[in-house]
Amino acid sequence: MTYPTGNPRFYVCHQTKPLTFHNGTPNMSRICDITKKKGLNGNRVSHSNIKTHHVQQPNLQKRRIFVPELKRYVMVKLCAKGLRKLDRYGAYRTLKEAGLI
């Protein structure tokens, strides 16, 4: 069998469009919509100094936020700090600054 790229490791059998939210970020990405936090790369180091790859992910929550100014709900994936920011500054202002409205 001949492969389009010449290498069977890079063969793509079909093209699919990634699912995206209304703000353009991929659906499965682990990024906070408000604070834009994402995973930090690092190593776990054992007693014998063996290093293995490790990623610290943000504390993401999916929340349905009601925005009184728009009279509708907005689905947001946000971290704990983003949730605190929503409480402190209000839903409309925070979502507007993040570019979600």
Image (cartoon, rainbow, N blue to C red):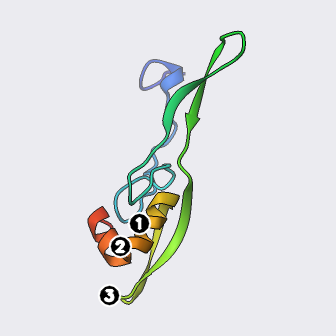
Question: Which residue is pictured at 50% across the width and 30% down the height?
Answer: 41
Residue nearest the viewer, comparing 95 with 85? 85
Crowding near the residue tagged with mark 3, few <14, some 14–19, many ≥20 C-alpha atoms within 10 Å: few
Q: Is residue 101 visible?
A: no
* CA gap, disc 3 and disc 1: 18 Å
Kindly report which numbered mark, 3 or 1, lies closer to the viewer in this rendering.
1
Pointer 1 and pointer 2: residues touching (CB < 8 Å)?
Answer: yes
Q: Quadrant of residue 68?
A: bottom left
Residue nearest the viewer, comparing 76 with 45? 45
Where is residue 79 shown, x and y percent of the image? 50, 57
Which disc, if any, is residue 59?
Answer: none
Q: Looking at the image, is 12 positioned above or below residue 18?
A: above
Question: Which residue is pictured at 38% across the width and 90% down the height?
Answer: 71
Q: Which residue type carries mark 3?
A: Glu
Q: Which residue is mark 1?
A: 85
Where is residue 33 shown, x and y percent of the image? 40, 59
In the visual, does 99 lie left or right of 4?
Answer: left
